[in-house]
């Protein structure tokens, strides 16, 4: 059912908030728990549509999974070779992570399987994983455009490869490593820039030997994973909307609890600090294989910056929210080297530029980034209000909702149902922190 956000102008964010569990970690907890020996107890699991699609896929392949119930899931692992052929295709919904990672894991199975997705996912590029997987011996057919559905047939044994990724992508890296679990010999992946390393961390936590040296990660196929408890931290990507909201709304004073601070995911913090944000990290600790901390954020006068290229892979999912911060900053913000944003759930460069322009902020879309002319005005309004389209992109929808904190008039964000893919309960949580938001059925 179509869903829209209506957000009243003004307000501030305050109090203590814990956003839902990390989506990337939740996906991997189900996948690796399913092929481990023994029972994996997961806490903090994200009960969003994307991670639930991964959970449903493994249930369809014969894995007993109890829950989720208040973020708790119990996965009865079937071992590396215990998955069974599903009845019918596996529907990944809107989840690119599910499709790309499963394409690697399922390439090593003894049965055929088809991966499908919704209209948005079916437009997203899959050759970036299917081509290197084919070099390993995987048999995967896609559409003429190189997109879903993906038809995976049993291969006569996979072979490990040494692959240098042309573009930094944690999904490609993880897909090849998961295929490498089933390959003869060693699989190595080199990346041109650091990307999130949740797969490597979780494999290690489950007893699988992973060798890392600089930008290169390797593993040898055929070993076993041993079940262990997995605690999923609060998602830093979901936290980003609140980090930006509290930074731009005068009088805000907000603490985000138990946020995952994996060093390959902290680009949003680094960029906001470079813009002058008032962020304090407290109670830093390790939870399982992941570092977590509380983040205290207060409103600050932001300034436009040229975003360092080395921060782009560390903040690739958080840029829609960062563009709202840039609009509220004094001076220009320039992002380049982020062509990956063109092939997310939407073309996030074009869609954000369109929405910012609708709300009265000058923004120029570039082939690999964007230039935003911030309006500053520490105590005044930045956005003019109006109706913006999210194009069914969850991160676009939540970003423009936060823009209302510095708006002169209400903002209506259209087509927000896909917010449930990553952040179920967003409107309720945001309202509790001070955003005057309501959901309206179309």
Image (tube, rainbow, N blue to C red):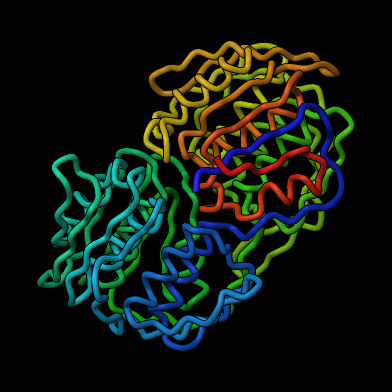
Relative vertical location of residue 335 with respect to residue 133 in this rendering, above or below: above
- For the point 51% across and 20% down, the residue is 353
**Residue occupying the point 74% across, 51% down:** 429
Please tell me which residue lies in front, 181 or 302: 302
Left or right: 440 in relation to 225: right
Relative placement, left or right, of 242 versus 282 is left
**Residue sitting at the far right:** 251
Q: Residue at (39%, 31%) from the top-left corner?
A: 342
Residue 36 shows up from this direction: yes
Q: Give the x, y percent position of residue 364.
A: 50, 13
In terms of depth relative to the viewer, which is nearer, 50 or 78? 50
89 is higher (above) or lower (below) than 418 = below
In the figure, residue 70 lies in which quadrant? bottom right
Q: Position of residue 30 (x, y in %)?
A: 46, 71
Q: Quadrant of residue 186?
A: bottom left
Q: Residue at x 71, y 33 (%)?
A: 7
Q: Nearer the viewer, residue 149 or 315?
A: 149
Residue at the farthest front position: 442
x then y, percent, for residue 229 = 58, 79
Q: Residue furthest left?
A: 156
Q: From the viewer's perspective, is 135 left or right of 90?
A: left
- Answer yes or no: is residue 314 visible: no
Q: In the image, residue 127 lies at what x, y percent?
A: 23, 45
């Amino acid at each position: 059912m179509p869903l829209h956000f209506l957000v009243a102008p003004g307000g501030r964010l305050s109090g203590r908030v814990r956003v839902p569990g990390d989506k990337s970690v939740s996906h991997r907890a189900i996948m690796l728990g399913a092929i481990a020996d023994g029972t994996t107890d997961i806490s903090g699991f994200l009960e969003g549509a994307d991670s639930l699609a991964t959970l449903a896929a493994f249930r369809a392949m014969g894995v007993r999974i109890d829950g989720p119930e208040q973020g708790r899931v119990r996965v009865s692992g079937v071992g590396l070779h215990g998955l069974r052929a599903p009845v019918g295709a596996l529907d990944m919904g809107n989840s690119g992570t599910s499709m790309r990672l499963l394409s690697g894991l399922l390439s090593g199975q003894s049965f055929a399987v088809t991966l499908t997705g919704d209209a948005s996912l079916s437009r997203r590029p899959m050759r970036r994983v299917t081509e290197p997987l084919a070099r390993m011996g995987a048999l995967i057919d896609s559409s003429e455009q190189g997109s879903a559905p993906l038809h995976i047939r049993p291969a006569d044994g996979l072979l490990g490869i040494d692959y240098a990724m042309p573009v930094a992508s944690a999904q490609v890296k993880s897909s090849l490593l998961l295929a490498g679990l089933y390959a003869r010999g060693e699989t190595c992946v080199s990346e041109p820039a650091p990307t999130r390393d949740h797969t490597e961390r979780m494999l290690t936590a489950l007893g699988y030997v992973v060798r890392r040296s600089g930008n290169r990660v390797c593993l040898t196929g055929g070993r076993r994973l041993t079940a262990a408890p997995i605690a999923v931290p609060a998602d830093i990507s979901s936290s980003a909307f609140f980090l930006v909201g509290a930074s731009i709304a005068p009088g805000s004073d907000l603490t985000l609890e138990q946020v995952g601070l994996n060093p390959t995911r902290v680009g949003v913090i680094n960029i906001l600090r470079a813009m002058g944000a008032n962020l304090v990290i407290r109670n830093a600790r390790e939870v399982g294989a992941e570092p977590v901390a509380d983040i205290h954020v207060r409103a600050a006068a932001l300034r436009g910056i040229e975003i360092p290229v080395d921060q782009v892979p560390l903040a690739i999912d958080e840029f829609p929210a960062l563009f709202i911060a840039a609009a509220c900053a004094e001076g220009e913000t320039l992002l380049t080297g982020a062509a990956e944003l063109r092939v997310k759930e939407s073309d996030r460069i074009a869609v954000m530029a369109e929405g910012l322009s609708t709300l009265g902020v000058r923004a120029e879309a570039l082939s690999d980034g964007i230039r935003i002319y911030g309006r500053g005005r520490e105590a005044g309004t930045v956005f003019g209000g109006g109706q913006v389209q999210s194009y069914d992109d969850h991160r676009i929808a939540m970003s423009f909702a936060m823009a209302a904190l510095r708006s002169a008039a209400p903002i209506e964000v259209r087509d927000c149902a896909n917010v449930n893919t990553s952040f179920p309960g967003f409107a309720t949580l945001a309202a509790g922190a001070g955003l005057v938001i309501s959901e309206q059925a179309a």
